[in-house]
Image (cartoon, rainbow, N blue to C red):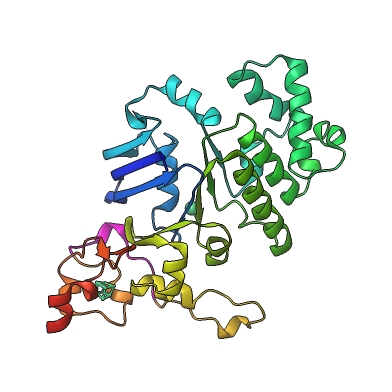
Amino acid sequence: MNNVLEINDLRTHFQTEEGVVKAVDGVSLRVRQGETVCIVGESGSGKSITAMSVMGLVEGPAGRIVGGSIEFAGRNLPDLGKNELRTIRGRDIAMIFQEPMSSLNPVLKIGQQIMEPLMEHLKLGRKEAYSRAIELIGQIGIARPEQIAESYPHELSGGMLQRIMIAIAISCDPKLLIADEPTTALDVTIQAQILDMLRQIKERSNMSIMLITHDLGVVAEMADYVIVMYAGKVVEEGEVVDLFQSPKHPYTQGLLRSKPILGQREEELYFIPGQVPNPLELTESCYFHERCAQCMDICQTREPLLKQEGERQKVACWLYEEEIAFHA
Ligand code: SF4
Ligand code: MG
C-alpha cells in the first residue's frame, strides 16, 4: 500500500510568555491509501496540533513547525508556499472539525457553500457545480437535497451541518480526509450514523482518513491503525486489534479501562488519575510518570523512546526495556 501521508519527527512549538510549549515533539506517522489512522489522546496531547501542522494552519506569530517533515504526494508540505498549500487544502486534503458552524459561513446558503470548492478547485461552472452539490447532498443521506441547498446554516441541526461539512470535504474527491473530533458534539445516535457514512464514503472512494479523537469507542469503530499521543509524543502505536487486545503502555491501558461500556453507570467508570503535565514544566523523564502506578526510578529522570515491541506494536515505556524492568 502506498503512503499518502508520511510525517517524520515533526516538531511544532509555540512561543508563549512563559516559555516554549513543545505541543508536538518528534511525532512520526504514516497514513496509507485507503487506511484510517486514528490519533487518540486526552486534550493537550498534541493530536489537533499535529493535524493543523499538516494543514499548514499553525504558522503564525506564536506557533511554528521547527523540525521534521510532512510528506504528501512526494512533497514536503511545510516547504510549500501559501498558494500551493491552499490548492492542496480543500482539494487533495480536506478537513472537518468538531464545530461545523465555525467553518460555515452563516450568511451563505448551504448549496452555495458546497459549490464554492467545486468552482475554485475543479473549475466547474455554476450550473455544473449546483447539480454536483445536489448530488453530494443526496450522497450524505439527506432527503430533498434541493430544499437543503436553499437553507442557511442556522436552519439546520448539528448533525445535518456535520453531514454538510462532510459533503464539502469530499466534494473534490480528496486523497486524505483529516477529521478532528468530528462527532464529539453530537448525540450517540447521530454520531453512529455519521461514522457509518464516513466509512461508506471511504470504502467507495478508497480515500485515507486521519481521525483525531479522545473517544475509544470511535477508534474501535473506525481505525485500522492507532497512534496514542501523550504530552506531544507518540507513546504507543499499532493495528487496532493488537492495541485493544494487548495495550502495552500504562497510559493506553488506562484509556481502555476508562472507556465507557454501554449500560455502565457514570460512577463506575475508571478515570486515569491526575492530568497531562504542564507543558512548560517538562523535564527529562517519562511524561506520564506522575500518573503511572508502575513508575520506576528511571522513569523520573530519563525519557523512554518509542521502540518496536513484539511484531506489530511500538511503545515508549521503560517496562519494555528488558534489562531495566528486570533490575527495577
Ligand atoms: Fe510508567 Fe515508567 Fe512506563 Fe512511564 S516509562 S509509563 S512511568 S512504567
Ligand atoms: Mg483538539
The reply to whether the magenta stretch includes residue 276 is yes
On screen, residue 14 above or below 126:
below
11, above or below 114, in the image:
below
| Residue shown at the point (48%, 27%) measured from the top left | 88
Q: Residue drawn 41% across and 78% down? A: 273
The residue sitting at 31% across, 58% down in the picture is 279
Vertical relation: 125 (above or below) 287: above
Residue situated in front as seen by the camera: 177 or 15: 177
Q: Is residue 321 left or right of residue 252?
A: left
Question: Picture quarter containing residue 286?
Answer: bottom left
Picture quadrant of residue 90: top right
In the visual, does 89 lie left or right of 17?
right
Frontmost residue, 45 versus 118: 118
The x and y percentages for residue 121 are: 58, 21
**Is residue 214 depicted above or below 144 in this figure?**
below
Q: How many marks?
A: 0
Q: Is residue 318 magenta?
A: no
The C terminus lies in which quarter of the figure? Answer: bottom left
Specify whether 213 is left or right of 65: right
Q: For residue 155, say whether it is visible.
A: yes
Percent x, y for residue 92?
A: 51, 30
Q: Which of 301 and 175 is in front in this view?
A: 175
Q: Is residue 109 visible?
A: no
Quarter of the figure that contains the N terminus: top left
137 or 53, which is in the foreground?
A: 137
Q: Position of residue 205 (x, y in %)?
A: 60, 39
Image coordinates for residue 54, horizontal then vertical, percent = 41, 38
Give the main secondary structure of the magenta stretch: loop
Per the rendered image, the range of residues in magenta is 274-284
